[in-house]
């Protein structure tokens, strides 16, 4: 379904509200300075990474990640992943490879630190998470690699 242009009335009804998924604010006409609004909007959009299946640090612990809900297809099976958190303390001072897999029609998360990291079964790469001294130090988003791989 193509994205439709908004009418003037629809735009007026959005002013002063926020988009429910991205949190981006719909500013009033003539907002000055617009620069801060634009940077906030771009930051929210970048942080959401369009949201689905995004791996991020969780506030509950320095070794816990959260995987956002999302929908994906693996070998023709459509999977609705509800989201979850995972404690990666077992991967301290290593890199954990995080992926989505199909387990008999049920989405599941796989995590491994073996050389190369990725499994030999159909999966969707989500992220490489590096931990050092009991803290997540880097999250490399790998979702686009999977989407555009051939």
Image: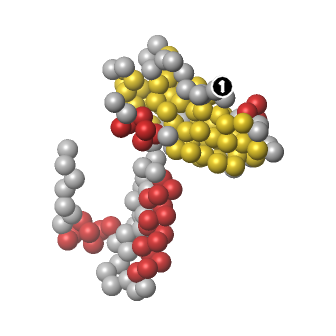
Quadrant housing residue 29: bottom left
Residue 45, image x, y percentages: 44, 59
Question: In what quadrant of the picture does the N terminus appear?
Answer: top left
Quadrant where the C terminus is found in the figure? top left
Residue 98 rendering spot, x and y as whole percentages: 58, 33
Q: Nearer the viewer, residue 5 or 48?
A: 48
Q: Is residue 21 above or below residue 18?
A: above
Would residue 29 appear left or right of 46 to someone viewing this image? left
Instruction: Evaluate whether residue 105 shows in this view.
Output: yes
Residue sitting nearer the eye, 102 or 29: 102
Which type of secondary structure does the marked residue at label 1 adopt? loop
Residue lying furthest top: 104
Q: At 39% across and 23% down in the image, what residue appears?
A: 74
Locate residue 73 relative to residue 106 in the image: left or right.
left
Residue 71 at x, y percent in the picture: 41, 34
Residue situated in front as seen by the camera: 8 or 116:
116
Residue 63 located left or right of residue 57:
right
Label 1 neighbour load within 10 Å: few <14, some 14-19, many 20+: few
Residue 135 in the image: above or below residue 150 = below
* Residue pictured at 26% horizontal, 69% vertical: 11
Residue to which mark 1 is pinned: 114
Q: Is residue 97 above or below residue 144?
A: above
Q: 137 above or below 128?
A: below
Q: Quadrant of residue 26?
A: bottom left
Q: Position of residue 113 (x, y in %)?
A: 66, 29
User: Which residue is painted at 46% across and 71% down in the image?
Assistant: 39
Quadrant in which residue 7 is drawn = bottom left
Report the residue at 52% width, 44% height from top.
Answer: 141
């Amino acid at each position: 379904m193509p994205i439709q242009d908004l009418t003037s009335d629809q735009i007026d009804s959005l002013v002063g509200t926020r988009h429910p998924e991205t949190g981006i604010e719909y500013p009033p006409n003539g907002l000055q300075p617009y620069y801060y609004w634009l940077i906030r909007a771009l930051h929210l959009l970048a942080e959401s990474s369009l949201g689905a299946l995004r791996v991020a640090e969780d506030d509950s612990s320095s070794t816990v990640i959260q995987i956002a809900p999302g929908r994906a297809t693996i070998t023709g099976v459509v999977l609705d992943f509800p989201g979850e958190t995972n404690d990666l303390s077992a991967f301290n001072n290593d890199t954990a490879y995080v992926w989505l897999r199909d387990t008999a029609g049920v989405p599941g998360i796989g995590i491994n630190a073996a050389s190369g990291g990725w499994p030999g079964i159909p999966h969707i790469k989500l992220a490489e998470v590096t931990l050092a001294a009991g803290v997540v130090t880097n999250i490399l988003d790998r979702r686009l690699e999977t989407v555009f791989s051939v």
